[in-house]
Amino acid sequence: MTTLSRLLDLAALPAAEIPESARTMARFSLFDWMVCGRAGVGEPLARILRDYVAAEGGRPVASVFGGGQAPARAVALVNGATSHALDYDDTHFGHVGHPSVGIYPAALAVGEEVGATAAAVAEAFLIGAEASVRLGMVLGSVHYNRGFHQTATAGAFGATIAAGRLYDLTRDQMRVALGLCATRASGLKSQFGTMGKPYNAGLAAANGVECAGLARLGFTSADDGVMGPQGFVATHSDAPSEAGVWDAPPPGTFVFEQIKYKLHACCHGTHAMIEALAAVRRVHQLTADRVAAIHLRTSPRWLSVCDIKAPRTGLEVKFSYAWLAGMVLSGLPTSADRTYSDALAADPGLAAFAGKIKVTGDAKVNDMQAAGEIVLTDGTVLPLAHDLAAPLGPDVLEASLRAKAMGLLGPEAESLWQAVVQLDALPASDLGKLLRAA
């Protein structure tokens, strides 16, 4: 079977066949996505997009983070970008993408438009997210390393499937929608550190709504825009491979369950280093003035993403190993987005400390790991290591996500958590009301 056939089978998977463990992770992601979106409404990018969409007008069928309603496609654009504005959302390392910000905005916008249940929105997201990760794995690391942002490229296909599932597309209509997405999906890593990065997430969501909506109305597309000649995979990856990607397909296996959540408001590629440094700091009561040098080994993939040597803005600090290392050892909170100001990028103490950091790529270190050593001023060498792949139990994950939400939103975070707890009894419109709350 081809990847297109597998994607179409996945899109039509009966809800009754979805395992509870996968549903649990999808609901954690829903909570985290709503928290990130609500926390991002004050960002300049969010205000610009809300104003842009309001000026366009249209039928108010779906809810915008921060207030108001608009057409589903426009809402998906705003909500995708807004929820990724803080760069604080989940990551799947199977294809190095952010599933929630590219797919939940499409699912909820269409869910509100068609009067779906909240549970159906979460199911559509899960199916779409699984599809995006699997397709991202087919595209391979070459696609990402070449400069494409998987959140926006593979993510757009996931958003298309999520929207198409809620629009109740037939198998042939879903094939058409994916073919249209093949000519629509886009997003580049060159935008990292600017408003263009979260915009990529909005593009994925909006493209998904558009492609599914056009297929619903009778549009046509290439027979196989995904894997066919001059299709998306052939034109966007120099070394695509289906080998092993579908060996254990859903419903038996949902690779989405390997999703990781950000507990630091910066690029996920830096989190293993942050956790490793924080652990050493706790054990040895380490302070920045005792450090002579840090030798960090990371996945070569991250060198072009989060190794900005001299960040100029607070946004760029989120992609700087050197600055983040200094923050950890200076006791500055990496979990609070308000920490990442332009003034922080100009901090002379962090600039001086950055000169002590040497970052190298090591093919033996994977995307979720950090390794290396800290050399102290007295000559002591301390090992440095952390692996984000270490699983967290549901109880620990719930506690961590709720603590993160409380730090971002305060008491209002509880209303979002209660909606997730009561999801089976809610219409999608109730989730929309939570997005609109000021």
Image (tube, grey):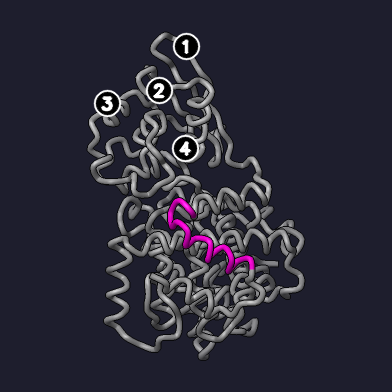
Question: Which residue in the protein does label 3 denote?
Answer: 352
**Does label 2 or label 3 sit earlier along the sequence?**
2
The one of 183 and 131 positioned closer to us in this rendering: 131
Residue type, mark 2 in image: Thr
**Does label 1 or label 3 sit earlier along the sequence?**
3
What segment is highlighted magenta in the picture? 406-421
Q: Which numbered marker is on residue 300?
A: 4
Residue 416, magenta (yes or no): yes
Residue 250 sits above or below residue 340 on the image: below
Give the structural element (helix, strand or loop) at label 2: loop
Residue type, mark 4 in image: Pro
Magenta residues, dominant SS class: helix
Question: Which residue in the protein does label 1 denote?
Answer: 380
Give the structural element (helix, strand or loop) at label 1: loop
Residue 333: percent from the left, percent from the top?
A: 40, 39
Residue 103: percent from the left, percent from the top?
A: 52, 67
Residue type, mark 3 in image: Ala
Give the structural element (helix, strand or loop) at label 3: helix
Question: Which residue in the protein does label 2 denote?
Answer: 287
Are discs 3 and 4 less than 8 Å apart at CB? no
Marks 1/2: CA distance?
14 Å
Residue 238, magenta (yes or no): no
Marks 1/4: CA distance?
27 Å
Residue 412 sits above or below residue 117 on the image: above
| Residue pictured at 68% horizontal, 61% vertical | 22
Residue 52: percent from the left, percent from the top?
A: 28, 75
